[in-house]
């Protein structure tokens, strides 16, 4: 696990074998690599490997790439970097990557890891299981709850989320959010930004690992992976349907 970022530390480990550089140098590398004929996706991953800032505000938008000091949201960083080189990247391929997670070329995990660096790759896995998969688990639990409500012939859609949290974590979302904020020393507010929602989701993942028995954790993780695969298949179907005559 990577150390949590403090007020005096706002860095991601740079690309293996290269010196620490700032955002501008990473973006310059991307531009030069594409200009020299390298595929934009490979050049992008190299730029991500060089990037050393964990969070920033750019053009009025706040970006947090490293959640809880451990989980790396590489697609968010890809979105940020690609804003600087939109004219150099095929628009359709960029949309496919950022909105559907579909890469323009296939890379095995070893090559992906080599390009972004070992530390970022491990933090990427933390994000995948701790945020992406955990979100899928919540969706699966909500669907289970919805089906049960249909069987019992009553409708409480407003409480679907609370019931899903109770099913997975043994407590309501309201109770868990209060615990999360108390643990993090955060004020008890009614709303959260996207970065805070992701951090809460990652906290839920770690809470589940700590509070649930191993068999239940394994079962829930498999359920979440199946739900995630279902979502991916649905996205792929929608993409293939675009542009087809009705």
Image (cartoon, rainbow, N blue to C red):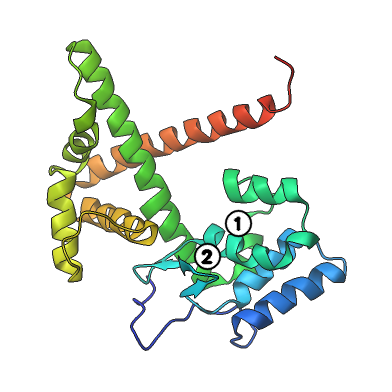
Asked if residue 106 can be seen in this view, the reply is no
Return the x and y of residue 146 as percentages of the image width and height. 27, 23
**Left or right side of 83 for 212:** left
In the rendered view, tell whether residue 19 sits above or below residue 113: below
> Residue drawn at (65%, 32%), measured in percent from left and top?
239
Gap between marks 1 and 2, in whole Å?
9 Å
Q: What element carries label 2?
A: helix
**Left or right side of 211 for 6:** right
Return the x and y of residue 68 as percentages of the image width and height. 34, 68
Q: Relative to the observer, which residue lies in front, 216 or 125? A: 125
Q: Are marks 1 and 2 in contact (CB under 8 Å)?
A: yes
Label 1 or label 2, whichever lies nearer to me, is 2
Q: Is mark 1 on a helix, strand or loop?
A: helix
Return the x and y of residue 124 as percentages of the image width and height. 48, 61
The answer to which quarter of the image holds residue 19 is: bottom right
The answer to which quarter of the image holds residue 77 is: bottom right
Residue receiving disc 2:
121
In the rendered view, tell whether residue 221 sits above or below residue 45: above
Residue receiving disc 1:
109
Q: Relative to the observer, which residue lies in front, 84 or 77? A: 84
In the rendered view, tell whether residue 56 sits above or below residue 215: below
The answer to which quarter of the image holds residue 139 is: top left
**Left or right side of 133 for 82:** right
């Amino acid at each position: 696990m990577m150390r949590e970022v403090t007020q005096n530390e706002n860095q991601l480990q740079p690309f293996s074998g290269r010196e620490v550089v700032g955002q501008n140098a990473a973006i310059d590398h991307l531009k030069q690599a594409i200009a020299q004929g390298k595929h934009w996706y490979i050049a992008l991953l190299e730029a991500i490997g060089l990037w050393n800032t964990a969070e920033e505000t750019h053009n009025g938008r706040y970006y947090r790439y490293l959640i809880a000091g451990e989980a790396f949201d590489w697609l968010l960083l890809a979105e940020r970097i690609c804003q600087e080189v939109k004219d150099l990247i095929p628009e359709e391929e960029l949309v496919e990557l950022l909105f559907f997670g579909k890469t323009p070329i296939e890379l095995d995990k070893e090559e992906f890891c080599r390009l972004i660096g070992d530390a970022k790759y491990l933090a990427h896995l933390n994000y995948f299981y701790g945020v992406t998969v955990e979100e899928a688990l919540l969706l699966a639990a909500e669907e289970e709850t919805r089906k049960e409500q249909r069987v019992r012939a009553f409708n409480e859609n407003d409480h679907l989320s609370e019931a899903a949290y109770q099913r997975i974590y043994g407590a309501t979302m309201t109770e868990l959010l209060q615990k999360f904020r108390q643990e993090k020393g955060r004020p008890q507010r009614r709303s959260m930004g996207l970065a805070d929602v992701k951090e809460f989701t990652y906290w839920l993942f770690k809470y589940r690992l700590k509070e649930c028995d191993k068999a239940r954790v394994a079962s829930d993780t498999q359920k979440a992976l199946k739900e995630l695969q279902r979502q991916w298949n649905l996205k792929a179907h929608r993409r293939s349907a675009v542009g087809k005559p009705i």
